[in-house]
Amino acid sequence: MSADIKSLRSSIRSVDSMLHLTSAMGLVASSKIYRASEEMIKARQYAETLKIMTATLASCPECQRSPYMRTEGEERTRLVVIAGDRGLCGGYNSNVFKAAEEFPEAEKLCIGKRACERFGGELTLCGGYTCEQGHELAVKLCEDFAGGKFDRLGLVSTEYVSMMTQTASVKWLLPFEKAEGSRAGGIEFEPDEVSVMNAAVVEYVYGMIMWGVREGFASENAARRMAMDNAGRNAREMLDDLRLTYNRARQGAITQEITEIVAGSGR
């Protein structure tokens, strides 16, 4: 009986220690969510503006000559995969990996420690990813696409819907689809439409990458907060059950000792 009590006491200490850990991680994630959400909203607004600008340019007949409008091929795919830097965030990382693995033949460039560990590549941290790094990557991707090194560029990232919901998906960035009709009527471009289009594409790819990074970082912290809340709730329930079992075992041991003492004194 004493061995059972000792084992229960050890289990209670372990679960209590885990409860403190999950509570601390949940608080850290909560403290990061507000600032991450602000950065995410700014990145969303910038990306939406770039989408409108490139859609306007793509509607110009002259821009059909741009290398970013070509549609032949689509066999060689390159994906920019954005995942988290750490685990303990529910299904956040696994959902990103699942979306990326739908294209097993694609070349993958990774942002985030977990993505680099899964698919290989140079280690970059999502939480500390800078605008300079994003712009360098965008320039390289656009140069490689224009040079015919790959035919399709996608971004695997997570969209923040709410604290409860984050959705991983693939967004195709290049090539641009041919726009029907003319939405650029009355707009004059200097020096010409194609030159403006080629310059704008780099900014568009850069903006989408940074949107994915900011959105992913906010999603990671939201997912971690929810995962730690669930883990803490389970730990408290387990702790209550262990303490109840421990108290019953301790009471039983005391009762047994009293019984043995009474039985011994009657002889």
Image: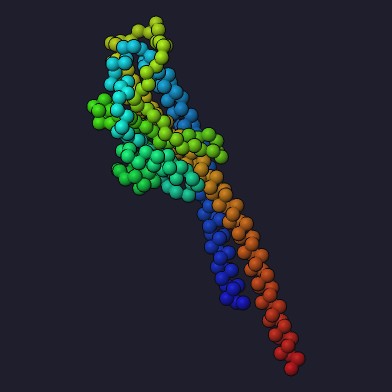
- Residue pushed farthest bottom? 267
Q: Residue at x 68, y 81 (%)?
A: 257
Q: Which image quadrant for residue 217?
A: top left
Residue 96 drawn at (x, y percent): 43, 41
Q: Residue at x 33, y 38 (%)?
A: 106
Q: Position of residue 201 (x, y in %)?
A: 33, 22
Q: By what rule are the colours in the image chosen?
A: rainbow
- Which quarter of the image is occupied by the C terminus? bottom right
Residue 136 occupies quadrant: top left
Residue 22 vs residue 47, the one in the foreground: 47
Q: Residue furthest right?
A: 266
The answer to whether residue 8 is above or below residue 183 is below
- Residue at image x 30%, y 24%? 72
Question: Could you say where residue 222 lies in the image, as x and y percent from the top left?
Answer: 51, 41
For the residue pair 231 and 103, the one nearer the viewer reads as: 103
As drawn, the residue found furthest toward the top would be 186
Is there any visible trace of residue 128 in the rendered image? no
**x 53%, y 52%: residue:** 22
Left or right: residue 260 compared with residue 156: right
Numbered label tally: 0
Name above or below for residue 1 compared with residue 68.
below
Q: Image quadrant for the N terminus?
A: bottom right
Residue 253 falls in image quadrant:
bottom right
Is any atom of residue 161 visible in this view? yes
Would residue 59 be found to the left or right of residue 72 on screen?
right
Height in image: 43 above or below 126?
above
